[in-house]
Amino acid sequence: MSVTLEAGITVGAGIGLGPVLPAPVLKLSLDAAGYTSGPWVDSVASRSFTLYGGASYSADGGGSLSFVPSSGQYAECTSSLSDLSTWTVIAWHYYAGTNTSVAPCIITEVFPGVTSNINYTLGCDASGGGNTRLRAGFFNGLWRTTPYTTLTAGNWYQIVGTYDGTTVKLYVNNTLVQSASQSGTPISSGAGIRLMSRWDNADYWGGKLAIVQVYENAMDASGVSADWSTNKTRFGL
């Protein structure tokens, strides 16, 4: 027996297709190409991110927001997304190599919030080892993350973290760089979302943010590649 998926594509007997992931659903989308002044507002549900410490607009990368850690610059929205048991987080980011303190993040949630959980994060966790260590993961009493990778200062990057219920993955510039089996169900902190800052203390991640997106459900490699192809020219990649 064979199955025809579409014209010209037939799968024969004995060939497994593997699990089919649910389609990613966009829940948060920020693009500084359309920024003018005031809060940075997402285009999905009009969530408003206040810019603290004088974070400012830059024309770099087709429009981005610049964050200087020494000035305590970060962005925060006071409301979280609903619980995302599986997720994708994307950041198009210019890495300046100016991170401060112990565990800065590119995107995370405010902690402890109302649940003492962090649904998703890109950045450092609290395990130490230096504030330039980039991981993807979540916190549900323990950190559930990928191993770390590092970035080279002075470059634009596509950074993507995903969790499909069993594995956390970290992609950099359309390449899977780290992956780890993890268990547990991520839960929203319920207290808000932070950009370029740690979830609680004054630890800041330096550089520029042009695009930030959060999806319900995990993208596969083809979804990451599609995002890369759509945006790479804007960032000279």
Image (cartoon, rainbow, N blue to C red):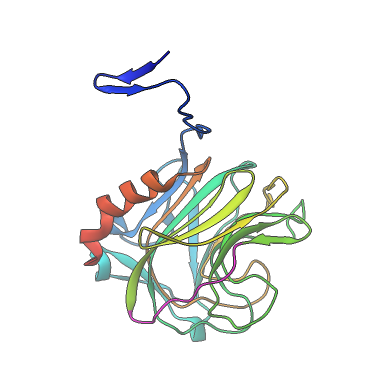
- Quadrant location of the N terminus in the rendered image: top left
| Residue 149 is inside the magenta segment | yes
Residue 79 at least partly seen: no
Dominant secondary structure of the residues highlighted in magenta in the image: loop
| Residue 19 is inside the magenta segment | no
Q: To which quarter of the image does residue 97 belong?
A: bottom left
Q: Nearer the viewer, residue 91 or 78?
A: 91
Residue 46, how many percent across, how many down?
A: 45, 44
Residue 189, how many percent across, how many down?
A: 69, 52
Q: Nearer the viewer, residue 176 or 194?
A: 176
Q: Is residue 149 left or right of residue 55?
A: right
In the image, the segment drawn in magenta is 146-154
Residue 231 at least partly seen: yes
Q: Residue drawn at (45%, 80%), measured in percent from left and top?
A: 68
Name the outermost residue toward the top: 1
Residue 51, how many percent across, how many down?
A: 47, 67
Q: Residue drawn at (39%, 16%), measured in percent from left and top?
A: 3
Residue 196, how many percent across, how many down?
A: 51, 70
Q: Residue drawn at (58%, 54%), measured in percent from left and top?
A: 168
Q: Is residue 22 above or below residue 120?
A: above
Q: To which quarter of the image does residue 111 belong?
A: bottom right
Q: Nearer the viewer, residue 48 or 186?
A: 186
Q: Nearer the viewer, residue 202 or 37?
A: 202
